[in-house]
């Protein structure tokens, strides 16, 4: 699979067309279409990889692992349901939460969610 094909397919998986992908990466509307015949600069390739949340190596076909690192917005995600339901320490303002307080928070969150 070529760089262009892999970029096109990944963009489609993300719900983008190539013009939208290029625009989000700060490139001209048809820049990615030119990748059929022209090798992009490293800067352009990195910008598109960032928009698509994949590695440059994935776009180049050097690996099939799309993103060896979690997305920036996924690095600090905590499942509160799991954290409050399981045994172990949960803290707020530097202080551990009691089991009763964790249960109350979990009940409040479920109520807000409509359960």
Image (tube, grey):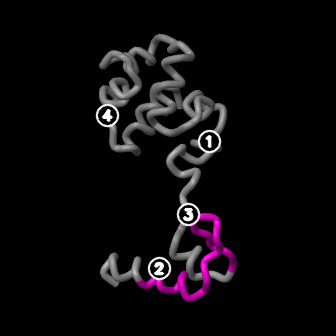
Residue at the spot x=57%, y=82% of the render?
A: 85
- Residue holding disc 3: 78
Mark closer to the observer (2, 4):
2
Q: Which mark is residue 64?
A: 1
Mark closer to the observer (3, 4):
3
Residue bounds of the magenta highlight: 88-107
Going from the N terminus, do you reach mark 2 or mark 4 first? 4
On screen, residue 112 versus residue 78, left or right, reads left
In space, the residues marked 3 and 4 are separated at their CA atoms by 32 Å
Check disc 2 and report its element: helix, strand or loop. helix
In space, the residues marked 2 and 4 are separated at their CA atoms by 42 Å
In space, the residues marked 3 and 1 are separated at their CA atoms by 27 Å
| Badge count | 4
Q: Which mark is residue 105?
A: 2
Reply above or below: 73 against 78: above
In space, the residues marked 1 and 4 are separated at their CA atoms by 21 Å
In space, the residues marked 1 and 2 are separated at their CA atoms by 41 Å
Image location (x, y in percent) of residue 75: 58, 51
Q: Which mark is residue 97?
A: none
Label 1, residues with CA under 10 Å away: few <14, some 14-19, many ≥20 = few
Q: Which mark is residue 17?
A: 4
Going from the N terminus, do you reach mark 1 or mark 4 first? 4
Residue 93 placement: quadrant? bottom right
Mark closer to the observer (3, 1):
3
Q: Nearer the viewer, residue 49 or 26?
A: 26
Image location (x, y in percent) of residue 62: 66, 32
Check disc 1 and report its element: helix, strand or loop. loop
Residue at the spot x=67%, y=82% of the render?
A: 87
Reply above or below: 111 against 36: below
Mark closer to the observer (2, 3):
2
Residue 115 placement: quadrant? bottom left
Residue at the spot x=62%, y=41% of the render?
A: 64
């Amino acid at each position: 699979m070529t760089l262009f094909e892999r970029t096109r397919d990944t963009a489609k998986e993300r719900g983008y067309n190539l013009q939208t992908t290029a625009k989000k990466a700060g490139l001209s509307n048809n820049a990615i279409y030119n990748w059929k015949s022209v090798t992009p600069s490293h800067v352009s390739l990195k910008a598109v990889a960032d928009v698509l949340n994949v590695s440059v190596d994935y776009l180049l076909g050097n690996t099939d692992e799309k993103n060896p690192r979690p997305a920036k917005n996924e690095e600090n995600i905590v499942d509160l349901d799991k954290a409050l339901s399981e045994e172990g320490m949960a803290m707020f303002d530097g202080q551990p939460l009691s089991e009763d307080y964790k249960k109350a928070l979990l009940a409040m969150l479920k109520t807000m969610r409509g359960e």
